[in-house]
Amino acid sequence: MIYLGRPEYYPIIERSRGLWAELEAETGQEILTTTRGLSIGTANGSYIKPSAPWPTRS
């Protein structure tokens, strides 16, 4: 897992993975879906620098 935010959140994020797995085992259901990657930010923010122009709404 990659998280480029505040380091004090790392232990919480790591612990949450185990808790999701426990809940899935208890319920027999898949609850957490992991993705290969997700980047969230604003078009003009410093985190995401698009290689192509952002789509605009007509």
Image (cartoon, helix red, strand yellow):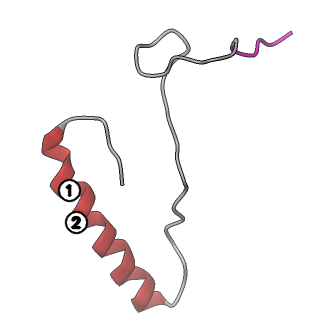
Q: Is residue 43 above or below residue 17?
A: above
Q: Is residue 52 above or below residue 5?
A: above
| Main secondary structure of the magenta stretch | loop
Q: Nearer the viewer, residue 23 or 44?
A: 44
Quick check: 38 left or right of 54?
left
Q: Position of residue 17 (x, y in %)?
A: 32, 68
Q: Amino acid at mark 2?
A: Arg
Q: Is residue 5 above or below residue 35?
A: above
Q: Secondary structure at mark 2?
A: helix
Q: Quadrant for residue 52, please give it.
A: top right
Mark 2 → mark 1, Cα distance in angstroms: 5 Å
- Tell whether position 32 is magenta: no
> Residue drawn at (40%, 14%), measured in percent from left and top?
46
> Residue drawn at (54%, 78%), measured in percent from left and top?
30
Q: Farthest left residue?
A: 8
Q: Quadrant of the C terminus?
A: top right
Residue denoted by label 1:
12
Q: Quadrant for residue 4, please give it.
A: top left
* Magenta span: 54-58
Residue denoted by label 2:
15
> Residue drawn at (59%, 18%), measured in percent from left and top?
50
